[in-house]
Amino acid sequence: MTGILMTQVSTPIIGQAAWLLGKIMDGIYRVMDLIGIHNLGVCIILLTIVIYTLLMPLTIKQQKFSKMSAAMNPELQKVQQKYKGKNDQASMQKMQEETQLVYEKYGVSPTGGCLSMFIQFPILWAMYYVIRNIPAYVGQVKAVYAPLLTSIMAQDGWQKVMEKIGEAKPILMSASKYDYSDKNVLIDVLYKFQTSTWETLGKKLPDLQPTIDSTVDTLKSMNNFLGLNIAETPMNLISNGVKAGAWGIVIMAVLIPVLSGLSQYLSVKLSQQTTAVTNNPQADQMASTMKTMNVTLPLVSVFMCFTLPTGLGIYWVASAVVRMVQQFFINKHLNKIPMDELIKENMEKAAEKRKNKNEVDASNVNKMAHKNVKNIHEPVRTAAQTKELEEKLEEAKKKNENAKAGSLADKANLVKRFNEGQK
């Protein structure tokens, strides 16, 4: 099985999104290179700003839906309470109809908020892959490893050496699963090297020490962000910093995970300012669950930041900060818009969509649904057709009068005579 870390992620949709984001990141790095800046940490932050700026319309749409939901929830809960405990088909259908009427009243779709999230999800997941595997998407970073890779493959027994190093921590890429004769796999392995791993490689292949030192110096320059090597994990930076007495690095390495968890928590809190307060037990239970998740997920983020490359931690901090800034201005903008205007805007958009799809307007559908059948015109007949119909009716009447005793027509005559006698 060939490793696929260096060879870009191939998952459908996410793979295409990662390819596009990789091109953007490669372009950012090239522009920075023109002005003499070779820093992947800054590159990650700029990429994060660009992506979240492009996602701004979806974020606004999602927040509008959240505000609408806050206004709709009391009405939706009344509908649910009205049909609580009624599980028959007629009641369920009426509940669905009344629920749909509430959504139509506010001009939104039940899936409006979910759609924005589903569109953003593959993009944000693709961002994770790009930042985790930068050499796969940024050509100039991949090129840094080329001289060392050529020198390694020219050594006798190099593959056994690389396999042994790769199978140990922190690489953990078993030779039974990854093909170490593949150059992309070797770059995968080298990209995950930490300080101790580079020292091990120098001891195993001492002739390559000058090339190793040159490569490490270049990578340190590219990966240096506020004194931290973004290719190494905060846990490793803390360990090395304590041994070397570099307490500044230790403090910064601790701050990245802490800031990641704190910024994500604040971002979520800010995005939920429009949540409605209700006395509905079911809604309160859901709110309680969300509150627990809002605390748990940032804590998980803190743990992951300690064990993953620092570059990912920088991305999580940057993304949370960008979201908070966006959220602040979006909330400020939406709070200035009266609810009536938002509803009117949504209704106009919904009507435009129906028009584009050649759909009948909802108000007309409602009128047709309640139209009395007595108002439906009878089909127009010619005089000849009317005369022919009368002749057939008269003929059928005579046959019924002479019906055989006990037949269906005879029974119908009995019922007719009985009704006439009652009158």
Image (spheres, grey):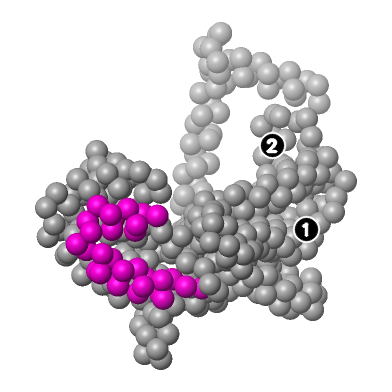
What residue sits 14% from the left and 49% below the top? Answer: 157
Quadrant in which the C terminus is drawn: top right
- Vertical comparison of 55 with 421: above or below: below
Of residue 366 and residue 166, the one placed in the foreground of this image is: 166
- The reply to whether residue 390 is visible in this rendering is yes
Give the main secondary structure, helix, strand or loop, of the magenta stretch: helix
Of residue 171 and residue 83, the one placed in the foreground of this image is: 171
Q: Look at mark 2 in the image and give the residue it sits on.
A: 92
What residue sits 30% from the left and 48% below the top? Answer: 165
Of residue 310 and residue 290, the one placed in the foreground of this image is: 310
Q: Earlier in the sequence, mark 2 or mark 1?
A: 2
Is residue 52 left or right of 271 when viewed as pictured? Answer: left
Q: Secondary structure at mark 1?
A: loop
Q: Look at mark 1 in the image and give the residue it sits on.
A: 275
Q: Residues within 10 Å of mark 2 (few under 14, many from 20)?
A: some
State the extent of the magenta-drawn residues as a range. 196-225
Inspect the image, locate mark 2, and give the three-letter code of the amino acid beneath it: Met
Depth check, mark 2 against mark 1: the one in front is 1
Name the spot of residue 281 as percent of width and height, x first: 83, 40
Name the spot of residue 400 as percent of width and height, x first: 55, 22
Name the spot of residue 335 as percent of width and height, x first: 79, 74
Q: Quadrant of residue 35?
A: bottom left
Is residue 270 left or right of 43 when viewed as pictured? Answer: right
Q: Is residue 203 magenta?
A: yes
Inspect the image, locate mark 1, and give the three-letter code of the amino acid beneath it: Thr
Name the spot of residue 346 as percent of width and height, x first: 67, 70
- Vertical comparison of 168 with 330: above or below: above
Q: CA distance from mark 2 to mark 1?
A: 27 Å
**Label ID, residue 88:** none
What residue sits 62% from the left and 59% below the top? Answer: 254
